[in-house]
Amino acid sequence: MKALSIDKYLYNLQFLKIKKEEIQLINENNFSVINELANFISSNTHYGNLNTFISLADIIVEFIEKFNNNEINPDELKKYSSNLKNILENLELELKEQFRVNFYFYGEDNLGIIENNLIKYDIKRICDENELKLFQLKDKNETDYNILVFNKDITHIDNRYFDETIDYSKVGDSLKNLTKILYTNNYDFSYLSNSLNESIQEGVEAIIVGNSYPLVGIEEQLLIKNTINLSMHSQDLYYAYELARKSISQNKNIKQCILGISHYVLNHDLSKGESSYSKNMIEKIYYPLLNDVHNYTESNIPTQQTLNDFDADILIKSFFDFDKIEDYFSKQIYINNKTYYNDLNPRIVNDSFMDYSKDKKESIGYYRSIQHNKLFKYDNTKPEYENILKEFINLSKTENIELIMVVLPTTKYYFNNIKIDYRNNLDNLIKNLKNELGVKVVDLRNLDFDDSDFVDSDHLNQKGAIKSTKYLNQIL
């Protein structure tokens, strides 16, 4: 007995899966799930010969009668919730036993979706057209749903055996293109999440963490050790530490951690930033990546958009594992574009601060330093971040990691406008790190960088980044 289309059958399975979770959240003010189950029963009477379907109908009728007589108390509600969850689980299993879904694949797996098991069902391969013709001559069980996934030109498919077909190339290419859109729309998260995954691979020997200075100022692919750059724009010490800790805890081959520090390293708490930019960094990068908002107080953080948010036929979503596919294609994009700047996110190679007039340089440097000088208003940040730095140092010693602090250069137009307290604090910190804590510090501020090495008042361009990386290689 197979009275339903494959789409309707899969919809019912999905419905039961969702409702067995929702039934656990039922409360005295919301019985909508009971009404939805009642509607499910009335629209699926063809399941009337299934024992669990009969049990579901009986308990729903009983619940509604008791509810109408005001006989549902909290204890009764808890009991019904538990019983209904079990019945829904059993009904889902019974449907899967009664009606089998069989997938067959014919053609080339050119996207690697089948080979890498990015699907939710087992699948049988059909080798050639002769085997395909033999399948179409077979008698079909009435309780079977047979689906052909194809990636070859097929002149004629006899629908006596196959209930539905899926064009592998068309669907696979769409999922690949959508993944690329998601990757580029939230590029910084995509890059950082893939870099974090890459940092735990066996061949990685070193990581870099910190803000935009080491992100744009170090060409990690030119370093003598196999290094992954986990730094990011506006990354503060807290998130630098959390990323390093996550990476180091999963990769015992890492022997060095480069931490890029700046004048305001102990004064910058990203999670306290009031700008939309700071909030966006927490909500779209660090929270989805680390499940950690630190001192951020906003609630109802929006979820990341994923492949699952795009509309697709239920047959497509039931067969293809969208989560695995997104991870797979996202990783492919990353592998082809490993550094932060690449074909997807190009760097302006010849951009130079030297090209600006002196007045323009003075103006850019002044307003940039003013932005950072404002960070002094967070009185509680410095003692908290001093403790974080101590934890960072202790982590490196415990894990036998060489922690290397790197101070990247800025132009004089920025440096001359930074608060004197900032400059003194950084100098004292460097002295303390070297003399009392035994941490290696590489200070590149006084080396031969000029305006042609910068893209703006305080960030190196590619020319400057190559120069700083050569210096680091001499020291590391």
Image (tube, grey):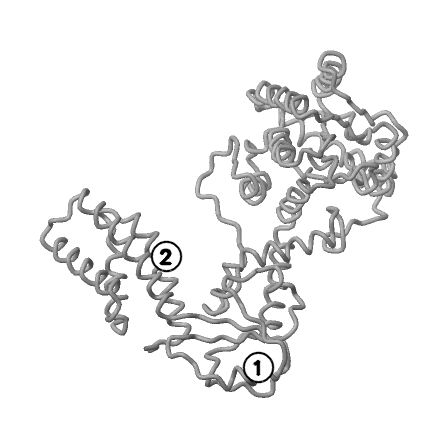
Q: Is residue 223 above or below residue 2?
A: above
Residue 2 at x, y = what percent? 35, 77
Assess disc 1: are there few (<14), some (14-19) or many (≥20) residues with their C-alpha within 10 Å of its C-alpha. some
Q: Residue furthest top?
A: 436
Residue at 60 percent of width and 67 percent of height: 172
According to the picture, the residue beneath numbered tag 2 turns out to be 18
- Mark nearer the N terminus (1 vs 2): 2
Residue 205 lies left or right of residue 278; in this view the side is right
Q: Quadrant of the C terminus?
A: top right
Q: Quadrant of the N terminus?
A: bottom left
Q: Quadrant of residue 323?
A: bottom right
Residue 230 at x, y = what percent? 68, 39
Residue at 37 percent of width and 58 percent of height: 17
Q: How many marks?
A: 2
Residue 83 lies left or right of residue 265; in this view the side is left
Residue type for callout 2? Ile
According to the picture, the residue beneath numbered tag 1 turns out to be 132
Residue at 29 percent of width and 53 percent of height: 86
Which of the numbered marks, if any, corresponds to residue 219?
none
Assess disc 2: are there few (<14), some (14-19) or many (≥20) residues with their C-alpha within 10 Å of its C-alpha. few
Residue type for callout 1? Leu
Label 2 residue SS: helix
Residue 402 lies left or right of residue 146; in this view the side is right
Q: Is residue 289 above or below residue 161?
A: above
Residue 264 at x, y = what percent? 68, 25
